[in-house]
Amino acid sequence: MAGLQTFRPYYDHRKTARVLDERRLGKQRIEAKQIGYAVLRRMGVIRDGRKGWLNHPIVLKWFNNGSPYLLDLKEYFAAIVCEWVDRGHKNTVNWGDLECFSGLGSNQRCPLTHLEEV
């Protein structure tokens, strides 16, 4: 499977966002949100019948065997969007419809780095 990934060359999300090129930075807004949807579907929070990306390796990494890194994914998304806007772009991708993350249990920081990503 291809097409879905997160880029984490650094543990610090803001530092990661700063080093991404324009194209990759823009795509990360969309892909982080897609990963968020897939994690929520795996958890059974979203039950819309869609199955896309549920078994993708990067979704499984963020899902973490049922103890997902939800808040870290949200922080990653926020850092990416902040950098996108700081570079003068208009952001058209928002996290609003995934706010249910806030009320769900979450592990601490995701240990993913560039060495582990798929």
Image (spheres, helix red, strand yellow):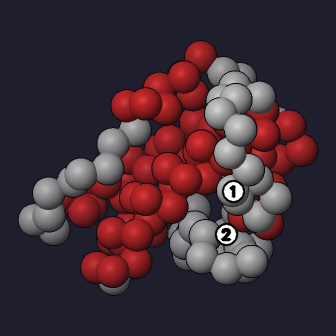
The answer to whether residue 13 is seen in the rendering is: no
Kindly identify which residue carries mark 2. Answer: 113
Vertical position of residue 68 compared to residue 46: above or below: below
- Figure quadrant of the N terminus: bottom right
Q: Secondary structure at mark 2?
A: loop
Residue 15 vs residue 22, the one in the foreground: 22
Please identify the quarter of the rendering in which residue 48 is found. Answer: top right
Q: Residue furthest right?
A: 65
Q: Which residue is rendered at x = 82% and y = 59% of the image?
A: 55
The answer to whether residue 105 is seen in the rendering is: yes
User: Residue 54, percent across and down?
Assistant: 76, 53
Instruction: Give the side of residue 7 with respect to residue 68, left or right.
Output: left
User: Residue 11, percent across and down?
Assistant: 58, 62
User: Residue 5, percent across and down?
Assistant: 61, 70
Residue 99 vs residue 21, the one in the foreground: 99
Kindly identify which residue carries mark 1. Answer: 52
